[in-house]
Image (cartoon, rainbow, N blue to C red):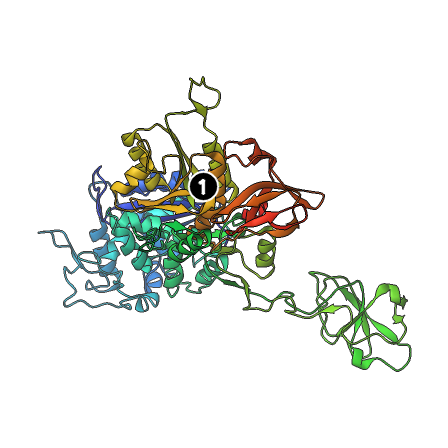
Amino acid sequence: MTRFDSFAMVDWSGGNDRGSAPKPDAIWLGLTRGADDTSPVYLRNRGVAEHALSALIETELTAGRRLMIGFDFPFGYPAGFAQALTGEPDPLAVWTWLERHIEDTPKTNNRFDVAGRINRQLGNGAGPFWGNARPKHDIPGLPRRKQGYRNPFPDRRACETLASGSFTCWQLAGAGAVGSQVLMGLPVLNRLRRRFAGQVSVWPFQPLDTSVVFVEIWPGLINSAVKQAEVQGGIRDAHQVRLLARALARLPRPALRAMLDITAPEEGWIMGLGHEDKLNRAAGADRLQPPPLRDDCFALPAGVDWTPVDDALALLRDRLHPVVGQEVLPLMQAQGRVLAENVSARRSNPPQPNTAVDGYCFAHATLPPGDPVLPLVQGRAAAGVPFDGAVPPGHAIRVLTGAALPDGVDTVILQEDVTASETEIAFRSGIRPGANTRNAGEDVAEGDTILSAGRTLTPADLALASATGLSDLPVHHRLRVAVISTGDELVEPGTPAAPGQIFDANRPMLLALARQFGFDTLDLGRIPDDRAALRAAFDRGAQQADLILTSGGASAGDEDHVSALLNETGAMAEWRIAVKPGRPLALGMWAGTPVFGLPGNPVAALVCTLIFARPAMARLAGAGWHSPQGFTLPAAFTKTKKPGRREYLRARIRDGRAEAFKSEGSGRISGLSWAEGLIELPDGPLEITPGTPVTFLPFTGFL
């Protein structure tokens, strides 16, 4: 059983109480439940840690969640130790022995005395343990240093000979003294096993058929991911437990299964050893972040003033790249997310040749001349219940739709075309070889790329991924879009409006559009014409979102504070685009976060969002460049268009023709609700009469 709902990671300490303030080299607990990380928890001593682990297990059991807990110390000793100490080779017998003999309080423990006792019992007082750290207190049988030390057992377990930077479990003091962690950790784990008897299993010593599983796994396996996280500051141990719990939660199930497929019944094993690349990749939401956009990414070429629509789109396409990180999600949670990497089929579809109909199958080459009469083999093949055996030449067997073809057959005849008795079938000659069958891999072959990076995953994509053996998919985090409306004239719908004030139409429209595009949203509200308030909103947006979308204040007037603030940062480009409605589009960077300053007019704001911001947001979200899907229809209106600007008319389709809204006025918001899309008119002059072909862009084509 490799499906878990929650993953916890414990960084253990063999020392005594570390005090109330979080410290390194202490006990830390990280937890990822589903796709949600929790903040690492500092546990000041082993008593507190045991209580916290007990409470965690109780919580997950009560909620019906399956829990894996990883610990960063060995679960077993090198070969021969368990037998010598307890009289049996079972490593869990060592756990019980240590629980009986180890005494532990927050301020003191007897681990050195117990190690000396074991040395005297097993190694004539010279080993296997070494490293007495008690000053001025010699312990019989326990040497202070390794010099002159004699070990009757191997120095390391088999897995530790493969683990870079590993230390011997016999060392109790000094740098890398994991021996103390083992002596002080195993009694705690054994008490938890007893408290939750029958509900906890220990890997790799026991079958993983319980609700809670203990595993040994070392944070050093994700060292590269931890180093990246340390750049942010904080305590390394806290980063380790958080990232390793996250990595285990995000591993595809086949990868997790491969890590658990280990046989080491006496010494145990380090889970994930040899799979460091997968763990680092799964841990990497902190490191799998694309580089930030350059502050000058929106700068126009020298000498450019008015920018044609196609040139503006080309500049955005060339200069933007994904700004969101990556994660691995279970298949059932991936709908609507953007695929971060190409994925390949883990199994062919169909995996074996099978039948497309209910009927009877046989080997075509063994058919007799004329109308065949074939003896029936006893049994049948059904979907999921294959026939266990081979069909002899010249025989037939009953098959049901979807069943794997038995050995020895290659053709299926419909049951409606057969006369059957209990022992034989008869049918007319003329059936072609391979009739009514599907070849293995005729849909998809194992190893084929089935879905490409940048694709927004659909229900059909999830069906294909599942059919080819995929249980998890690498996806981008959702783009987070912050939305701001600016202007003293705006008030919230439902509140009194003074003379000269209007209700804010842009913010609900833009928030809904961003959600419709599949992005997460952050509503930063209505900001008055106040530079300090707008600065605070920008600061919050830069901290909590990947993109800031504003409306109003994007031009060069006295109260156009969006443009003014972006100009202060030195990363502002006011694009005057040859488009109607629209023209001014303020683009800039605020604390590394791109800002799209849209016109304040709702019609222009919608058009600029669909034509410019939508493809840009798709690019930032990892979905590639998004061009709207349109088609040509005859016009149902008359218009004379002047040259110089690309124009977009609110439009809808009736009786197979494109109708334009009765007014082109940008203040006519009702036209947005009336419309089903936009008519795109080219930059040059155009005379339109009823029947003239025009390009219609349905609103659904922008999704």
Residue nearer the viewer, 289 or 323: 323
Residue 144 image position (x, y, % from top left): 14, 59
Left or right of 277? Residue 383 is: right
For residue 129, side relative to residue 259 (left or right):
left
Q: Is residue 276 visible?
A: yes
State the count of labels: 1
Vertical relation: 570 (above or below) 525:
below
Query: Which corner quadrant of the image does residue 383 belong to?
Result: bottom right
> Looking at the picture, does residue 355 appear above or below residue 101?
below
- Residue 544 place in picture, x, y as percent: 36, 40
In the displayed structure image, the side of residue 384 where residue 27 appears, left or right: left
Q: Nearer the viewer, residue 473 or 590?
A: 590
Q: Is residue 580 left or right of residue 561?
A: right
Mark 1: amino acid: Gly
Question: In the picture, residue 264 is in which quadrant?
Answer: bottom left
Residue 274 versus residue 503 in the image, above or below: below
Is 221 or 287 nearer to us in this picture? Answer: 287
Q: Residues within 10 Å of mark 1 (few under 14, many from 20)?
A: many
Q: Which residue is mark 1?
A: 582
Q: Find numbered disc 1 in the image and state the secondary structure of the residue it sits on.
A: loop
Is any atom of residue 267 visible in this view? no
**x and y percent of residue 147 in the render?**
14, 67
Of residues 115 and 373, the one drawn nearer to the viewer in this rendering: 373
Q: Position of residue 429 (x, y in %)?
A: 88, 76
Residue found farthest to the left: 136
Residue 493 sits above or below residue 700 on the image: above
